[in-house]
Image (cartoon, rainbow, N blue to C red):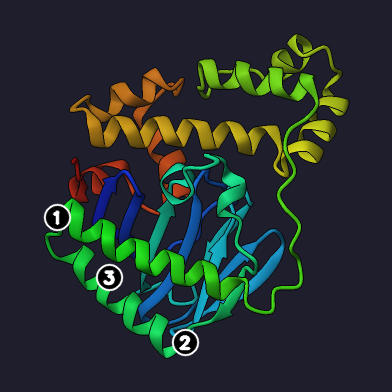
Amino acid sequence: MSRALAVFHGRFGRATVYQLNRPFNVHAHREGHLIFHVGGTPAQIDVSEQRLLLKDDTVVAVNPWEPHNFLPTDMDHGAIFFVLYVNAEWFAPQPATAQGLRFGRTFFPRTEVLDRLIRRTAALVCGAPSLRSLDCELRQLIDSCYEESWQAAQDARAAAAVTDFRVRKSIKLMSESPGAEIELDAIAREAGLSRPHFYRLFRTQTGVTPHLYMNTLIMEQALDALVATETPIADIGFDLGFSSQSGFTRFFAANVGMAPTDYRRAAKVLRP
């Protein structure tokens, strides 16, 4: 069973160490995403339909809203991964946009310098870090990965902004009350689009489907409720539109790799 060995939430985003042995659904994050293999059997990761083998000499960098999933190769024992979810506003406050956190390459070598930073920071996360010490270590590691990702990068295009007012309206409607019960067909009608046109235009503008976008918003709400409140897990699921705790648990595990009880048990919030 996949489990969280350490989870810290802070201004930087999330810093986690997971032991993973189950596949995920295709999902995305508002944050930038860095994945490091630190123990056990290498695993495969699909990023925007590109399959990558993550080992202890490589780094996978996923841009905000870029679809990806995880495919373990050892279903019995799994492997240990150090995973960062980087808040774009913390990384590049001026301007505070996800474009400031766009990596140059998805897959790049783990240099000796990077390897030392990765292992030192992972060990810190597994200890009992202060916000100041973790913030400093993460800044150095993330900056180094960002710079390395742009070394000899061929694609220097910036991420496109959402320009169509109908897609912006649909995003606003989704964000106002994200939940599993929301009908995307109703969102399409509110935005003045037919279902096929809505799905096609939304994906063109954002890079993800409306369904995946909504799942991301639901996951953000779920994570916030798990770490910032003591609300029972069944109630969190009901508040997010799930008809049963088991349905919410299946959804959460498919997107995070473990049950919400396991995540809450490991998660800690670091505050200034």
Residue under pointer 2 = 111
- For the point 74% across and 9% down, which residue is it? 190
Helix or strand or loop: what does disc 3 sit on? helix
Amino acid residing under circle 2: Thr
Residue under pointer 1 = 130
- Pick out the residue farthest to the bottom: 112
Q: Nearer the viewer, residue 67 or 136?
A: 136
135 vs 166: above or below: below
Q: Nearer the viewer, residue 138 or 77?
A: 138
Q: Quadrant of residue 148?
A: bottom right
In space, the residues marked 1 and 2 are separated at their CA atoms by 27 Å
Residue under pointer 3 = 122
Q: Earlier in the sequence, mark 2 or mark 3?
A: 2
- For the point 38% across and 20% down, which residue is it? 238
Mark 1 is surrounded, within 10 Å at the Cα level, by few (under 14), some (14 to 19) or many (20 or more) other residues, namely few
Residue 64: give x, y in percent of width and height: 58, 49
Mark 3 is surrounded, within 10 Å at the Cα level, by few (under 14), some (14 to 19) or many (20 or more) other residues, namely many
Q: Quadrant of the N terminus?
A: bottom left
